[in-house]
Amino acid sequence: MSSYTEFARVYDELMTDIPYDLYVEKVLEACKQPDGKSLLDIGCGTGVLSSKFADAGFDVQAVDLSEEMLSMAQQRFAKNQQQIPLFCMSMSELNGFAEIDVAVIAIDSLNYLSEKQEVTDTFSAVYSSLKKGGHLFFDVHSLFKMDELFLDGPFTYESENQAYIWHTEAGEYPHSVHHDLTFFVKTENGLYERFEEHHVQRTYSVQQYVTWLKEQGFTSIHIVADWSNQSPTETSERVFFHAIK
């Protein structure tokens, strides 16, 4: 699993197509009157969602495995004059949190866990961290996206300040993909710096996630797809889960 060492510098520009505000709306629809409610943003990255959740009224704490991502998040919070505690830890080893109202694992962060045990450990740790009636929200890549769409590469991207070439290949686990990205980032002197990132993602069927959630004790599991309120289909790309303790 990559720690996003160099990737943190370019992450935000590459994620401009993610409708973060819609993610916040989805959580607010289920969690009325957020003022004073605690929210744990797990796999917070550069803190975009953490900041937006704080603006919405939640009392936010944020967790990520990458120190570089957390550094970027801290800069964001300072610029926005927000006091959001940050913690560096793996989501599968989450500890030290209790009586949390809402936990969020957003933007396919869960797919970076390559072992089944890591996923179930994450669900267990989140369940223990939530108060009775607490909410868990997360999204994952679908089987269709992992097995078919990702393997249609290579993909390319170019902007004024950066470009990348993104190669993908099937991983050794079922429904897993290796991502090899080569970046070219413009520096202050006008030259381009090259660096490479290797990432591995893995997903599971909707029913498998439901089974694991129920085994931990989660109830009232609601599932939609692709930023809509519609149930997943065979060609859905991103699946959203909302479970209650």
Image (cartoon, helix red, strand yellow):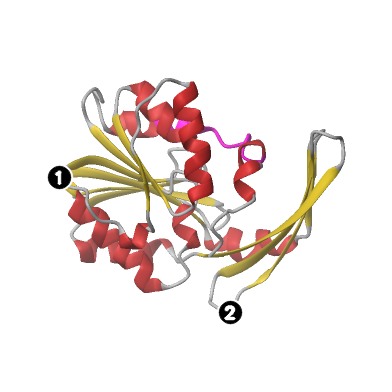
How many marks the image carries: the answer is 2
Q: Residue at x 50, y 61 (%)?
A: 112
Viewer-proximal residue, 37 or 95?
A: 95
Q: Is residue 239 left or right of residue 36?
A: right
Q: Position of residue 109 (x, y in %)?
A: 47, 53
Q: What numbered label is drawn on residue 131?
A: 1
Residue in the image at 39% along x and 59% along y: 90
Residue beneath the point at 45% across and 66% down: 204
Local secondary structure at mark 2: loop
Can you say whether 49 is above or below 192 in the image?
Answer: above
Is residue 175 covered in magenta? no
Left or right of residue 76: residue 121:
left
Q: Amino acid at mark 1?
A: Lys
* Residue at screen point 45% across, 42% down: 230
Which comes sooner in the sequence, label 2 or label 1? Answer: 1
Name the residue carrying label 2. Answer: 172
Q: Is residue 17 magenta?
A: yes
Front-most of residues 208 and 87: 87
Instruction: Report the Cα–Cα distance between label 2 and label 1.
Output: 37 Å
Q: Is residue 202 above or below residue 187?
A: below
Residue neighbourhood size for the residue with mark 1, other residues' Cα within 10 Å, grouped as few (<14), some (14–19), many (≥20): some
> Residue 16 shows which numbered tag?
none
Circle 1 sits in a helix, a strand or a loop, which is it?
A: strand
Position in image of residue 202 (x %, y %): 52, 66
- The residue carrying pointer 2 sits among few (fewer than 14), some (14 to 19) or many (20 or more) residues within 10 Å by Cα, namely few
Give the percent coordinates (x, y) of residue 88: 39, 51
At label 2, the amino acid type is Glu
Q: Which residues are magenta?
A: 14-25
